Image (tube, rainbow, N blue to C red):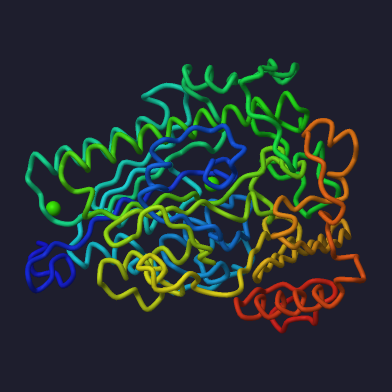
Amino acid sequence: MTSVSAPAASDEDGAKGPNFLFIIVDDQSPFDLKVYNPDSTLQTPNIDRLVSEGMTFDTAYHMGSWSGAVCTPSRHMVMSGRTVWHLPQKAKRGRKPLTTAPKDLADHTMAAVFNDAGYDTMRTCKRGNSYEAANAQFTVRHDASKRGGTDETGSRWHGDRVMEYLTERDQQADTDPFLIYFGFSHPHDTRDGVPDLLEKYGATNHTDKNRLPTANPKQPELPANYLPGHPFDNSHMNVRDEVSVSGVWKNRDERTIRNELGREYACSENIDRQIGRVLDQLETMGELDNTYVFYTSDHGIAIGRHGLQGKQNLYEHTWRVPMIVRGPGIKAGTRVTGNVYLLDVLATLCDLAGIDAPATNEGNSFGPILRGESSEVRDVLFGVYCGGTKPGMRSVRRGDWKLIKYESIDSGARETQLFNLAENPHEFLQEHHASDVVALTGHQPAKNQINLADSAEYADQLATMEALLLSEMKRHDDPFRFWDQPKSSAAK
Ligand SMILES: [Ca+2]
Ligand SMILES: [Ca+2]
């Protein structure tokens, strides 16, 4: 198929449709990046360039997961634009899947839609914990998990694939618009950094379970909301990420966490280098001004925040994702709230390309925000973690208020948290006020920076957020209910 006859690849005047470079990293908290956390020592000059030349979203989220492999539903949502309970799911033997999705959904995912519109589609990314049927739709594909500490085994490998693709297009004078899905395998563990960046962040690729990594003043400081352990059973405390990540295991001491954050930063700056190479190449080819560049992550990560290590929680460091977009018509250096999900990306790409989003899509385009016409696409944000004991965790946010609920049927744990994120952006708990914790982090929370769920003063706010959570669970076909909610007809 040639692009000439395609509806969107060129308009009536023959003007070419915009290109897309969609960059997605694996397991990065927005708070690793200086744009979201001024205290961060991570240096990312090329992501900073996207920030200064584009638009930064402060409230971008993934909708969650029904699996310990949070990557899997997240990447299904990116590819299909569908909500968390409306995704294809491999059912466990003898059990019905918890979710529902059309059988032919893969035919309506990102690359399929853009192929039909006359785009050239290419991807590189990790393998596994993804949406294989959607990934297979890309015309050019170079997937491999690259989490090593060398050029061939690490992030540079993904960068090389995009550089080769662009160079070939240039040599062949290929003028079709392109959609490049530029994925990385890092900073997901194992976080093996390249030597010069490990040195820069004072970190080592620690492998010896019987001793602690070496302390180094160049390592990142402990996060402000670090805890030596999570204060209660959150429904999945024994998940792989919390107990068996190489270099951390069950350790939450200062040396382990600072070294692991140093590794995370080393891996993240190496990703930034690859982005810089590709941006320069697009500029050299004269394509940068006609290319929308998206930067995001499949979800966040804890690494010591709240005493957690992994991605199986709904605190802001893990529920939120970075979202930065640069491209034609986007006002440089702008910052918006947004209230967007990763599942809005597909509708947004289609909107910017002037093509119809597929009927199976449930996301909202944030094109109007990028064009400066609005600042939010919705009022309420809903989060799910249901990969361990059920019903697990749910969160809901409206404005500054956020509720998180936890329940484990197995252990009987039941917890509710209410935060005002304007007043308590780090979601400090009573445990963060302990003198030994304050001595480690150097952060003394203010008196009101606690979980407000048990405070009589906020009882009305709590009831409002509880009602909002239930309505979001119903609206999104959540099959579970908490102990204090009316049973759903679908629930067991
Ligand atoms: Ca991930
Ligand atoms: Ca072509």
Q: Nearer the viewer, residue 223 or 157?
A: 223
Q: Residue at x 72, y 42 (%)?
A: 305
Q: In the rendering, at what x and y percent does residue 177 appear?
A: 18, 57
Q: In the rendering, at what x and y percent does residue 106 appear?
A: 37, 65
Figure quadrant of residue 12: bottom left
Q: Is residue 427 left or right of residue 169?
A: right
Farthest right residue in view = 456
Q: Is residue 263 left or right of residue 342?
A: right
162 lies above or below 411: above
Q: Which image quadrant: the C terminus?
A: bottom right
Figure quadrant of residue 9: bottom left
Q: In the rendering, at what x and y percent does residue 157 appear?
A: 35, 31
Q: Is residue 292 left or right of residue 259?
A: left
Figure quadrant of residue 206: top right
Q: Is residue 352 left or right of residue 104?
A: left
Q: Nearer the viewer, residue 114 or 450?
A: 450
Q: Residue at x 42, y 42 (%)?
A: 47
Q: Residue at x 53, y 17 (%)?
A: 199
233 lies above or below 145: below
